Amino acid sequence: MRKLLIILIVVIVSQSCEKILFEKDLASTNPYDNFDYLWDEVDRKYSYFELKNIDWNDIKTTYRAKLFDGMSEDSLFNVLKAMLFELRDDHTNLISPFNIAIYYVELQSPPNIFARTIQDYYLKDNVYYTGPFIHAFLANNRVGYISYSSFMNSFSDEQLDFILNRYKDTDGLILDLRMNGGGSLFIVPQILGRFVETNTTVCYFITRNGRNHNDFSDKESFVITPHDGIRYKKPVMVLIDRGSYSATTHFALATKALPNMVLVGDTTGGGGGLPNGGQLPNGWTYRFSIGQALDLEGKNYAEDGVPPDIVAQFDWSDLTKDEIIDRAIEEIIAVDN
């Protein structure tokens, strides 16, 4: 667990502090030096070559041939960007003073949520806004609905205490994570700690640690510790769709180990890798996945998406109802009865 925390700290630092000091004797603006450095870093550390069947040597041959002495910084940026995008990984970035390359994974299905439907036909005037959470009573006060739009949005223990105390007498909760694109992995245990009674291993992480593309560290347990304050013990329906990515995929994977939490909706968008980054000889920074998330059986499917326990799809021909919320309510009431 200690090693995992170190990895996560490095990830956050690499994302929030782009000015990383580079050894002076390696500093270079030569396009070949920068290309070779980036290619080698990815070759030594990227975690999904085998899973995605990527021939990194062939990619090197293709893109190195596009270099030439005296090429502009913009031209070099575009070559390096195109090479990184061959990884087909939404955790891949290249950052320069004049441009930022971000690879976006296309949604595999239409969005499974329409905000106006939720507001007009479910929340109405009953809605509360507590920090980043939108919440309300549903189904004649039998169900508590909580929407959390991004794991980038922090909150206090007091705010979560207020919400859970408000819905303490409900039959179950709905936690809506649809179109939540992820954010800080540290928030995952902050929320899940409210729904466990004992220290619980929910998944594992492995990290590239050798020259071969399938060289990985031993599994590191991701353990959820119970919060020492207000906790909720009744059923929790977690709503997901293809827009649920990165930290949200990790959250969804973790719920597979928690019997009181059920995934409802569509498969998440993936992004099960642990991103890390560094700096090129010319000062540009980069990021890509260096680790993988595994379920309790050691299976690796989070990069492609975590499937729901109950499949439900939004019907775009009728915007007066949300089939995913309705199904979640049905499941909660059925358990209580």
Image: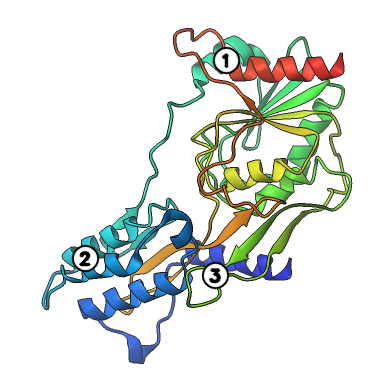
Above-or-below relation of 215 to 260: below
- The numbered dot on residue 62 is 2
Task: Determine the CA span between mark 3 and mark 1.
Answer: 42 Å
Q: What residue sits right under mark 1 in the picture?
A: 322
Instruction: Please name the residue shown 50% across and 24% down the image.
Output: 112
Mark toward the start of the polypeptide (3 vs 2): 2
Q: Residue type at mark 3?
A: Arg
- Left or right: residue 166 versus residue 186 is right
Instruction: Please name the residue shown 50% across and 40% down the image.
Output: 269
Residue 177 percent coordinates (x, y): 60, 34
Q: What residue sits right under mark 3 in the picture?
A: 208
Coloring basis for residues: rainbow
Within 10 Å of disc 2 (Cα), the crowding (few <14, some 14-19, many 20+) is: few
Mark toward the start of the polypeptide (3 vs 1): 3
Task: Determine the CA span between mark 1 and mark 2.
Answer: 47 Å
Q: Quadrant of residue 84?
A: bottom left
Q: Nearer the viewer, residue 124 or 209?
A: 209
Q: Residue type at mark 2?
A: Thr
Residue 288 percent coordinates (x, y): 44, 62
Task: Determine the CA span between mark 3 and mark 2.
Answer: 25 Å
